[in-house]
Image (cartoon, rainbow, N blue to C red):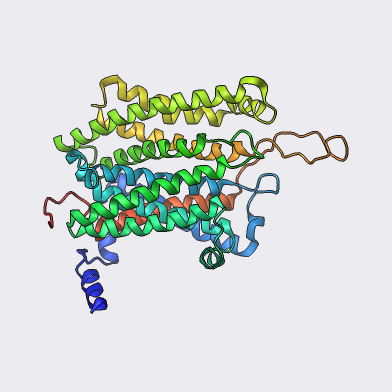
Amino acid sequence: MNIEKIKEFITTIPVNKVCARDLMAFEKTPRNNILAVVIFSFLAMLVVGVAIYLGQGHHAYNVTREHPWGLLIAVYIFFVVSSTGLCIVGSLGDVFGFKDYELISKRAIFGSIVTILAGFTVIAFEIGHPITMMIYNIASPGLTSAIWWMGTLYGLYLTFMVIEFIFLLKHDMKMARYFGLTGLLVGLAAHSNLGSVFGFLNARPISNGVFYPTYFILTAFITGIFIAFILMGFRYKLDFSEKVKTMLTGLAKIQALLISILIFFVTWKMLTDIYGGMPNRAEVAIHILGSWTFWAEVILAMVIPLYLILKDMGKSHVILFWASMSGMVGIFFMRYNLVHDTQLKPLQMLKTREYQVAPEWIHYFPSSTEIMISLGGLGLCMAMYYVGTKVFNLDEDTKEVK
């Protein structure tokens, strides 16, 4: 009987029947044609990058014993941060009941699913043995490992997001609210736990501490709002209705507050890193302040969006769409800097007087394979989202099951 109910539940999920011809039946505008070429190119890069990785293993990457975390770790963080941020944005309407944001709930929750799937795809080719990892994640759990908790919580989070999305499709807002709230709490726990992976690094003073577990939640919400502007911009071709404008203006005002808090956080983080000249922390912070990637993060993700929002309190929605594009580029640099800057200072052996060359800054640049897999992850994310727009109705639906 239970099996029959499950079958009935699954078969009654509202989906649109699509075929390959339907997927290719998009409006052939220059913008859409360029996007199609970009997606196919990125997917081709993913195939080539994975093929090289399968043939050469981690030798295809420019990671080393001194710099073991590379671009794929940064891109994984980029995607899961985006997923958590979209989950928060989607929860504003269907979980917390803010009516203005209900029109983006399904689109944001579906976006949170595809972004985390893209993140899992990218990290699968960094782990080395993802199948073995999943087996021993259950068979031999490492309860004292932040990475074990991260993987476990993100798996649960994805499960709750999928169930919430199904109930949203079925217009069962009561059940969607229950699973949405549970998924949000698990997602926030998973995301702050991801920050603790860096905060627990006692050997890396530049990262160690309570900053990153809270910083990750803040930047996730900021990322989610950037993506919300981008998704709605493409959905409405930058010709927004009054209802959409109201929602975007509200999101812009929230974004202004969040970015202001982020600037406050980052400023005090750098000041406390530099103050007192603590070895292995102060000189790293000063080195970071001199890097162009740090200032790309600050200008693209903080200064430009905040200035454009405050200029007219978030009413220039088309301009803020492009500001969000700028913001997402800055968010990428934010994730890349997080991973790379943590490893700038080489670890020293216990003997500091003999058999050791004077330490220098560690240099790293991703290999072509890392770049192809990373861009492939972005292409996969875009392709899954596009297919989802064809298969599911992601627009607001006023019908509700009590």
- Closer to the camera, 32 or 13? 13
Q: In the rendering, at what x and y percent does residue 262 appear?
A: 43, 28
Q: In the rendering, at what x and y percent does residue 208 appear?
A: 59, 37
One can see residue 226 in this view: yes
Seen in the picture, residue 135 relative to 189 is either above or below; the reply is below
The image quadrant of residue 26 is: bottom left
The image quadrant of residue 364 is: top right
Who's the residue at 22% across and 74% down the image?
5
Q: In the rendering, at what x and y percent does residue 32 appear?
A: 30, 48
Seen in the picture, residue 128 relative to 270 is either above or below; the reply is below
Q: Is residue 381 shown left or right of residue 240?
A: right
Quadrant into which the N terminus falls: bottom left
Q: Is residue 64 shown left or right of residue 34?
A: right
Seen in the picture, residue 332 relative to 270 is either above or below; the reply is below
Q: Is residue 32 shown left or right of residue 345?
A: left
One can see residue 42 in this view: no
Q: In the current view of this chain or complex, which residue is farthest to the right?
A: 354
Who's the residue at 28% across and 60% down the image?
23
Quadrant into which the C terminus falls: bottom left
- Closer to the camera, 386 or 269? 269
Q: Is residue 59 shown left or right of residue 43?
A: right
How many numbered marks does the figure carry? 0
Who's the residue at 39% across and 49% down the image?
187
Q: In the rendering, at what x and y percent does residue 167 appear?
A: 23, 59
The image quadrant of residue 4 is: bottom left
- Closer to the camera, 332 or 179? 179
Q: In the current view of this chain or complex, which residue is farthest to the front?
A: 143
Who's the residue at 27% across and 67% down the image?
19
